[in-house]
Amino acid sequence: MIDIATLKEYIKVLEDSTLQAMELSDGTDTIHLEKAYNDVATTQTVNVTPQVVAGADSPAVVNLPKATEAPGKTINAPIVGVFYAAPSPTSEPYVSVGKRVKKGDTVCIIEAMKCMNEIQAEEDGVITEILVNNEQLVEFDQPLFAIQ
């Protein structure tokens, strides 16, 4: 049986991540954790609901969704926050697919705790793919752009 302390740790991991669900098994019991979203005005509430399924025959395994891997080199998020492709809603994006960037060029902004952080290219190259959407919440080290 999975102890309460371990279950609480996995619930915290689920709440703090972009994962939608996870399943835990200790060989006897299987617990399925899933986020349920309730929108109230502009506030989003996340509820984690554990479900116990008795008699599972598999060993202790945590099945986590695989992160989407970007092809080749990437420019990754150095912080957690909200991704903005342009300096303002009416401005053109800093970069687009096919644009050549030089080391130090601003490629986007990530807002963290009401601070706007300009993210810069770490090397010269050409943007081959934009991997996130404007105003999307991004995680630490999440690929933002593919670059060659």
Image (tube, grey):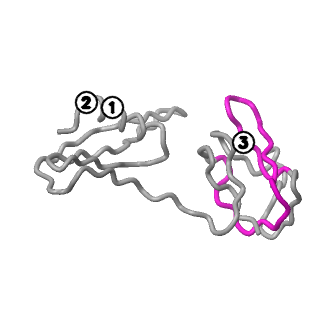
Q: Which residues are magenta?
A: 106-135
Report whether 138 appears left or right of 13.
right
Main SS type for the magenta part? strand
The earlier-in-sequence mark between 1 and 3 is: 1
Residue that sits furthest to the front in the current view = 59
Q: In the rendered image, which residue does mark 1 sit on? A: 8
Query: Disc number at residue 110?
Result: 3
| Amino acid on which disc 1 is placed | Lys
Report whether 35 appears left or right of 16.
left
Is 115 situated above or below 119? above
The earlier-in-sequence mark between 2 and 3 is: 2
Residue that sits furthest to the left in the current view = 55
Image coordinates for residue 132, horizontal then vertical, percent? 64, 56
Image coordinates for residue 88, horizontal then vertical, percent? 81, 44
Report whether 115 appears left or right of 101.
left
Asked if labels 3 and 1 touch by Cβ distance under 8 angstroms, the answer is: no
Residue occupying image coordinates x 38% and y 43%: 35
- Per the image, label 1 sits on a secondary structure element best described as helix
Query: Disc number at residue 36?
Result: none
Image coordinates for residue 64, horizontal then vertical, percent? 39, 53
Front: mark 2 or 3? 2
- Per the image, label 2 sits on a secondary structure element best described as helix
Residue occupying image coordinates x 82% and y 58%: 123
| Amino acid on which disc 2 is placed | Ile
Cα–Cα span, label 1 and label 2: 6 Å
Q: In the rendered image, which residue does mark 2 sit on? A: 4
